[in-house]
Image: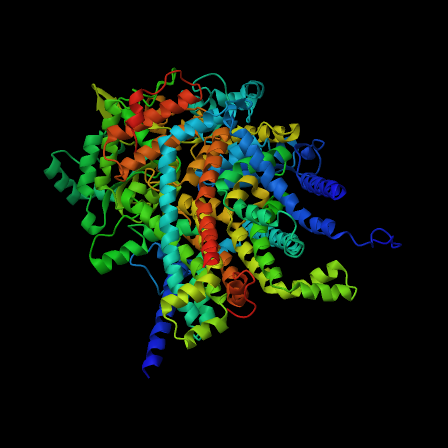
Amino acid sequence: MPPSVAPWWRRRLPPPLFAWLLVVPVLAFFAIWNIVPLLWMIGLSFYRYILTFGVNPVYVGLQNFSQILQDYNVWAHIGLTVLFVIGAVGVETLLGVLLGFAFWGQTTLPGRRLALTLLFSPMVLAPVAVGTFFRLIYDPMYGILPYYIHQFFGVPAPNLLGNGSTAFLSVLATDVWMWTPFMILMTIAALGAVPRAMLEASAVDRLSIPRRLRYVIWPHAKFILVLGVLLRTIDAFKTFGLVSAMTAGGPGNATQLISLTLYREAFDSFSMGSASALALFALFIAIAFTSIYLFVLNYQKREVAAE
Amino acid sequence: MRPKLKTRLQQGFLWLVAVAFFLPVLWIFLAAFKTAGQILAVPPSWIFRPTLQGLTYMASHQAFWTHALNSVVISLSAVVLAIIVSFVAAYSFSRFRLRGTDFMMFVLLSIRMVPGAAVVVPMYLMYTALGWINTYPGIILFYTMFSIPFSVWILKGFIDGVSPRFDEAAQSDGASRLHVMFRIVLPQVLPGIVAAFIFNTIFVWNEFLFDFIIGGNQVATIPVALASGLYTSQGIDWQYIASLTFVYTLPLMVVIYFFQKYLLVGMTFGTVRGEV
Amino acid sequence: MRKISASKAAVAVLAASSLLSMAAGVAPRPAARQQPARTSRPIQLSILGIGGWTPSELALRMAPQFEAYAKKQWGLNVHVTEASAPFTALYQKAATSLAAHSPQYDIIISDSQWLGAFATPQWIVRLNRVIQTTPMLNKAEHNWIAPIIKWSYQTYPYQSNNLYGLPQEGDTLVLYVRKDLLDNAKNQASFKAKYGWPLPTHFSQWAHLRWSKFMQIVAFFNDPKKGFYGLATEYSKTYDFMSDHVMSMDWMWGGQIWNHKTHQVYGVLNSPQNNAALHYYVNLLKYEPPGANTWGISHDINAMTQGKVFAALTWSAVGPAMFTPKMKNKLMVVPPPGHMVNGHFNQIYCIGGQPWVINRFLNKQQMQASLDFLKWWYLPRTQLNFAKLGGNPVLKQVVDAPGFTKIHPWYRAYKYMMVDAHQRDFWHNPDYAQLLAEQQAAWTALATGVIHSAKQANTYTACQQQKTLYDTGFTNKQPPASCRNVHL
């Protein structure tokens, strides 16, 4: 570089420095709001630290973890959470993809914009409000759903949230109602990513529908679709406000998702050490869960490359 | 005539689906215009004389305006800040391909995996230690972080779609880097910015747990007010919750109606330029 | 290359530290509130209360009276601000704020069980000296209506002489019954014909009623075909809603919830008496409305005021909500039934009500203002006003004064019940939240058919609670090995 005469602030920074400078704010945020708390959490998970006991943290080694691993309830609640994630995301994806295809195909639907706005409305509601209102909607005495079930099927109004076997499904159904629109949105976006020209060409070539899906649509739509499923999986695993407002994890422990257990450990018991350990454990499971998708994505990539 | 009828049927079905999903929302919205007795009425009343009792009662509370203002100020400033920061970083990731870019992108996504109830513990302890509890910067900066990962992902996709030749052309004309970034590239990724803005606003707007734990009465937003104001001495205050939910959700629905195009394009992560 | 990485590290550190200092600089520090006393700027006194809970709201509504009194009496310029959270969230709100050593709430309306959790880490002020040296408080301290007031709302450890709270309201479970249906001559005749004894219509008859007799009345009025039911109680998993009732039943049936000296739970909570009591309580659902197995306080109020149930077993504090214009002349409030064990009539219920506690992280001025507020609170005049609005006062002068039971229809039952013989409190222990969550899960599981035996529910609870108390060092006895196989 020739010696420059311009004052230092006018001088052009060397590209790598400039590039790093642009990333610094994000890195700073990342460091303060993620690295620090994460390290804090990891550190704390080796301590016994109950705020309501007013004593300093005591190092206990792996005791918090061994207690978690031996706790039947933790496993039961994680199992329930996994069931919830699979059930919710499975149904949402299935419904979302089917309906997404239908809405994508109907670009001339009269009032499409309004229809989609109505369709997307459930996911903009606050989960706390949804939980509270669905408790009313499901209420056997005042609720609208049991009332119509009673009217149309002639069976007594069911007590959906007050029954160990239906409470879980009722919460699941609420989640499906709330988040299927998100999968519809992602499907429409994913299909939008398929180049029109290729679609038209495949129509001209009279390619069969499964083949069109396999060779034209999937390669382009895959990324967005899987990302949608991934985001849903992550968020379903984190479900908290909806369930805590609707059932508080009950009846019994029928809807006790791991996030509720975690919250209880941290902010009912104020046992920060064991809550941190449980949080790490949950994080580990979440990562294991999500890396399945990343594996699928990579596997697909390799498969495509091999062809 | 046959295919026309088939289309009509399909379209009718799609409208039916849209309305079916909207029905519970409608039920909540209608409740905002009912008396408490009408909300609990069996059989349910669909047709009734609307009352503004709930809404005026809500509006007469000073606390409502404080919470509403907090919601607007906190979510807008957090999301705007996040988008500025994310845009700049996404530009760098896209154009300079720094070592570790892929890794950074993955790490950013993985942040989202952490269950909220898990992060809130160390966050709470950290905020306590630093005295950030119940402060505007504390809560706003947290929500900024909350919004960054998704924004970076969307914006990087969009910037990837803008050919670097634009940058080069402008730079050879003597434009500064910042000029290229904000005047040349930014206008072309506007759909991505709008999409990131809408999505993050929805998330932050509705977030409850963190504001409840690391916020306080000074920075309480409407979801917290919703959870705290559930009861009156007469029991659950349905009228109040319904009114609050109505007023709180409507702006988001209006935004979705007017910016729908961007929302759909945004979710393609920049792979599409035109309409979806 | 090395130069660049050094500079980028420097930039990162700089950015991070500037962000930190920026955020920290704006944070209100405890010290920021330190002002010279008796300034013209009003002292802000902030009270955290229970949202949707009448006695709590009444106290806050009376705050302007305190402001006027403080100005007149002490020349103090005080402004009271309020914050509230519902029962379900108040503990989190209060504890997270106190754990942060935040002075944001000066006075907190706590629940009696929380005293241990707040006192152990010294988040709240130990009040012994203050009460001793403040004549107005000292006078109140010696004039509670019953010793149970002191034990429940003031002490940690329970029944010790360490005082951490002062009673805000007293409260007891009472029975709201439909007077109009009891007074109906046709009902009286057919009841007598069916059960062979007359329907009780007077307070004194109800005061000595047994559960077995009461259930005959409930069954008599229960008429699901007409959408009318015998009884509403509480089974919600939220907070302690089901526990208050179940523990009351345990005590009446002759059981204990733990040994409060040794903290032994296993073998105490899962006793045959308690199993029978729990079984009995869950069976009440037969006469309760559909969905009542998840009901909390608010549902009981709704059901009663909408004329859907004959009786509701709930708190005296909800009296103002129960006596709506429509129900005003149809309701009667009586002591809830008791149970005969070994020739002894047990009428023991879980005490309600809440204490005031004072945040320990206040500056002198805030502390003084908080104490001033409490001094004002126990003025007989203030207590009388509180009573007139429908709160539940605890001062002898007010409750024992002639005419007290005439102020509100529920005060006679309140006064009758607020004595040591009829009240008991559960653990004041820093572990309370965990203990509570464990039994709430087990008992609600039974009420909703997730599990089917009261014995299983109580054994599970005893195992879990024993383990919790063992883990935190309150007992040195582990739960027995058989607990490994007890699940919900």
Query: Does residue A9 appear in the picture of this structure?
Result: yes
Above or below, comparing residue C36 to residue B228 in the picture: above
The outermost residue toward the front is: A306
Residue C267: horizontal and vertical position, in percent? 29, 20
Residue drawn at x 52%, y 36% as measured from the top left? B121
Q: Is residue A123 above or below residue B128?
A: below
Please tell me which residue lies in front, A132 or B276.
Answer: B276
Left/right placement of residue B138 relative to residue C442 reads right
Residue at 46%, 74% (x, y): give it.
Answer: A201
The image quadrant where one finds the N terminus of chain C is top right
Of A155 and A181, the residue lying toward us: A181
Q: Is residue C19 left or right of residue A76?
A: right
Q: How is the image coloured?
A: rainbow
Task: Point out residue A227 in the picture as x, y percentages from the top left corner.
Answer: 48, 54
Q: Position of residue C2 (x, y in %)?
A: 74, 41
Give the quadrant of residue A73: top left
Please, is residue A83 above or below residue B156 in the view?
above
**Residue C224 x %, y %:** 20, 48
- Residue at the limit of the structure toward the bottom, as seen here: B1
